[in-house]
Amino acid sequence: MIRTIIAVIFAVLVVIIAIPYLGLQWLLQKKWPHFGEKFGFRYMQFAFRVVSFPLGVKLDVIGRENIPRGRPCLFIGNHRSYLDVILGYPTLPEMTGFIAKNDFTKVPIMPIMMRRLYCQFLIDGDLRQNLQSILAAIDNVNQGVSMYIYPEGKRGTGEDERELLEFHEGSFKIATKTKCPIVPVAIVGSRERFESQFPKARAGHVIIEYGTPIEVEGMSREDLKGIGAKCRRIVAEMVQRNHDRL
C-alpha cells in the first residue's frame, strides 16, 4: 500500500510542476516549435519515470533497435494495465502520440499535456468522435509523428495474460492509409504489478518487447485483409515468449 501512496504523491507533484511547465512550453513552441515539442515530450517521459519509480518495477526492454528512426510508425500492442502507458512511454525514442480512452481527461492538466503531444482520445459508444480521432491520428502520421494504439480497445482483465482480446481492424487504418510500418509490441507482467491487487502495488518484473516492423507499403489489398488478426498472432507469440521468461 505504501508504494501506491508514494506513487500518488509523486503524480500530484508532477501535475503541480506541470502548471508552470505548460506556460514555458507554450513560449518555447512559439519561438522554436521543434524544440518546444521535444521539451514537452521529454518532460512527459521524465514524469512517467518519476511516477513509476516507487512501484518497484524491474523493467526490461527488448528490441529497441526494431523501432524505425527518422520516419513515423504505428505501434500496436496488448493492453493489461494503466502501467502500460506509464512504463512504455519513456522507452520511445521519438515523438509519439497515444490513442487513449478519455479516462485521462478526468485528470487535471493531463488532457492539455497529452493533446500537445499529439494524443487522441476515444469515447465508448461515440463512433463519430472516435472516427475523428482516428482521422486526426492519420494526419499526425502524415506530419511525421508516430502513433501508439491498443487495438483490443480496452484493458484485458483475464487471469491469463496470454489470452488477448480481438484486435479491431479499424485501428490499423492509421497504417494502411499512410503506408507507415507497424511495430508490434508485447507487454507482460504489468497487471500483476498493480491492478491484480489494487490498491496495493507489488514490486516485480515487467518486460516490453518491440518486434520486427511490418512494412505496409507495397502490400496488396489481399495481403492487407485481416491485418489486425495477423498482428494479433504476432503479439500473442511475443507475449507467450516473454511470459515464459518471467
Image (spheres, grey):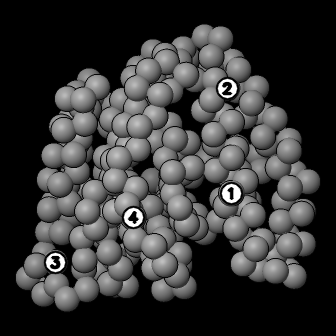
Image marks 3 and 1: residues in contact by CB distance under 8 Å: no
Alpha-carbon distance for marks 4 and 2? 29 Å
Labels 4 and 1: the sequence-earlier one: 1
Labels 4 and 3: the sequence-earlier one: 4
Above-or-below relation of 167 to 68: above
Labels 4 and 2: the sequence-earlier one: 2
Q: Amino acid at mark 2?
A: Ala
* Disc 4: which residue: 67
Nearest to the observer: residue 66 or residue 143:
66
Asked if one can make out residue 29 in the rendered structure from this viewpoint, the answer is yes
Q: Residue at x 63, y 39 (%)?
A: 49
Image marks 2 and 1: residues in contact by CB distance under 8 Å: no
Above-or-below relation of 160 to 105: above
Query: Viewed as shown, does residue 178 lie left or right of 240?
Result: right
Marks 4, 2: nearer the viewer: 4
Q: Residue at x 90, y 62 (%)?
A: 23
Q: Amino acid at mark 1?
A: Arg
* Disc 2: which residue: 7
Q: Secondary structure at mark 2?
A: helix
Alpha-carbon distance for marks 2 and 1? 20 Å
Which disc number belongs to residue 42? 1
Q: Amino acid at mark 4?
A: Ile
Q: Secondary structure at mark 4?
A: loop
* Disc 3: which residue: 224
Image marks 4 and 3: residues in contact by CB distance under 8 Å: no
Q: For mark 1, does the 10 Å Cα neighbourhood hold few (<14), some (14 to 19), or many (20 or more) residues? A: some
